Amino acid sequence: MRTTRVKLLTLTLGACWISASSMAAITATSDDFSTNTETYPNWISVGTTNTEFNYDGTTDGDYDDGDPASKLAYTPGMTLTGDGISDLDGSDGGLRLNTLDAVQGNEAIGLTLAGTLSESNTISFTGSVYNDNSSFCPFNAQLWNLTDNSLLAESGNITVDAIGHVAYTPKSFDVSYVVTAADEGDTLQIRFLENANSTARDIYVDNFSVTSTPPVPPDPGLQVLEWNFNSDADPIAEDNPNYDYTSDQTYVGSNAVANTLAFRGGSGGTDYLLKDKGTGHEKSLLFRTINPQGNDVGIYIQKMDFRQGGLNTTNQTKVSWSFDILGSDSAGDVVPSNWTVRVNYANYSPNINTSDAWFNTNNSVLAQTFDFVDDDATWTTVTGSYTIAIDDAGTFGGIQIRNPKGQGAYTSADGVYLDNIQITIQTIEPDLTGLFDDWAAGYSLTGTNATSTANPDGDALNNLYEYALGGNPTNANDTGYATMLNSGDDGGTNWFYYVHPENNTAAKSGLNYTLNSDENLVVAPGWTNAVYEVLGTAEDFYADGFNAVTNRISTEGKSQEFIKLQIDGL
């Protein structure tokens, strides 16, 4: 490994950090009431009238034979035990709200939860209830903002039949709420509110669970676009040979909205219709042209951002497609072979076009050819993908699906059906293996000599560094392009300049070049990441596609320092 030593001034780094307290989200809470704690002291009466509640150990009505999925309807003489959560040995229980007045909605019990509400979190309040009484039991399960004294969400009325009723069965409830900004930091309470006008109608809570789940952030490196045409009318366009399906108008080119699906026909009649093609293809796009057409006939997905907000600058972008296609031919004009999918991926101009010419220029590639069946009955699913190298994607791109060039003449009865179009744009980690393997094979390296850590020519650099710096792994006298060192003053600050080569292809695939520093090669702590600036990259500065990367390190206040180039990624 090449190491460049430079005697500089001693570097002392200081670091600072700022801590900030944050409120804890609602604490996940659950109970199956299998332990008798008598009055359950953390529960309180929160109704207009003071409410009596206690542990219910009889639980004849609490049953599902240990399996929540197989609750049975009651029949006289049935033994009713178990909630499927606690055991079935007689210790199972519940919490009973014993109504004492006959006013509907007067009595309720509540449990205040630890933690506070967090904006955008989803509160999930679930559980099950039963009935040990001879009268039916109606109630509501509620989520309550105790700070603001306001109802957030409730289950609606839940009625559990009397235990002797032939249709008796325990019931489950499920209440959820997405916390708003107005709730941030507030206290949450769960409640059970009686909803009957009789003292005989009690509430029996078998088990409950409360969780607070943060939202799943959207993956900035993943976008899925889909068109299945099922929600559209028939026909979708009349006398419109160049049609923007997304906005339902004539295609508007550079003013099109993002991710526009467009059709390029060219006839004076109806080019696009929706037809029912049976199960799985209830609505499908019939694409046809009446008169002989030019080369631009096809399907276009336009104004796509393959950089995904700039992520392509550090990772590769994989664009994948899937669609179903069916030939409907009565006059033999449909050619079902050698159809193509082209990708335009490095365009930065909003002036995109539905034209074959545009997809044969501007960094476009022929990504796939495919065949399908032309019998008006057999659907073919076409899938494919293309991986865009690091920093090669543009802010405007597209996909073209079209017939063989120059074969666009269909009769009015002929055409091609398309359905279930799906496009996925995904940021992926770069794969260096293929590029490095090709490089090693180019020098006829095999076996262990072809690995990144091998050093077949016995010089100072292993294969990884030879690959990264332009060296020859079979010639000890060729270690690649040399680094360039210099020093100078800029604005009154003294700088040390370190210029190193960079493999253009490897860099776009994720190979990492960094500078490490050490104040003393004998005394710990050893090599660490250097504090330096990357001033710029001169692309193709060297021959064979190698860039020159200029870095600088301040020498102010330092007595000595050693610098080396660190390369990794394979």
Image (cartoon, rainbow, N blue to C red):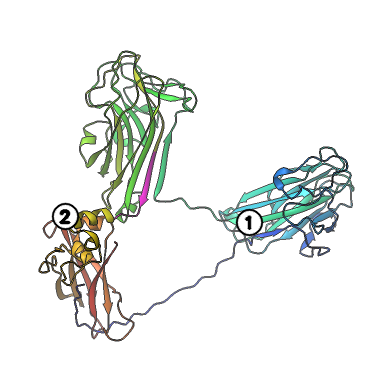
Q: Is residue 535 visible?
A: no
Question: Chief secondary structure of the magenta span?
Answer: strand
Relative placement, left or right, of 102 versus 153 is right
Distance, label 2 to label 1, CA atoms, is: 58 Å
Measured from the top left, where is residue 73 in percent x and y? 79, 39
Q: Which mark is residue 2?
A: none
Dot 1 amino acid type: Thr
Quick one: quadrant of the N terminus?
bottom left
The answer to which quarter of the image holds residue 16 is: bottom left
Residue drawn at the location 23% of the way across and 66% of the way down = 454
Q: Position of residue 362 (x, y in %)?
A: 21, 40
Residue drawn at the location 86% of the way across and 51% of the way down: 99
| Residue density around tag 2, few if under 14, some if 14–19, many if 20 or more, within 10 Å | few
Mark nearer the N terminus (2 vs 1): 1
Picture coordinates of residue 266, whole percent (x, y): 28, 21
Residue at image mark 1: 211
Residue numbers of the magenta segment: 423-432
Secondary structure beneath label 2? helix
Quick one: quadrant of the C terminus? Answer: bottom left
Marks 2/1 in contact by CB < 8 Å: the verdict is no
Viewer can see residue 406: yes
Q: Nearer the viewer, residue 538 or 471?
A: 471
Q: Assess disc 1: are there few (<14), some (14-19) or many (≥20) residues with their C-alpha within 10 Å of its C-alpha.
A: some
Q: Residue at x 41, y 51 (%)?
A: 220
Q: Which residue is denoted by mark 2 in the rendering? A: 442
**Amino acid type, residue under disc 2 in the picture:** Gly
Residue at 23 percent across and 55 percent down: it is 437
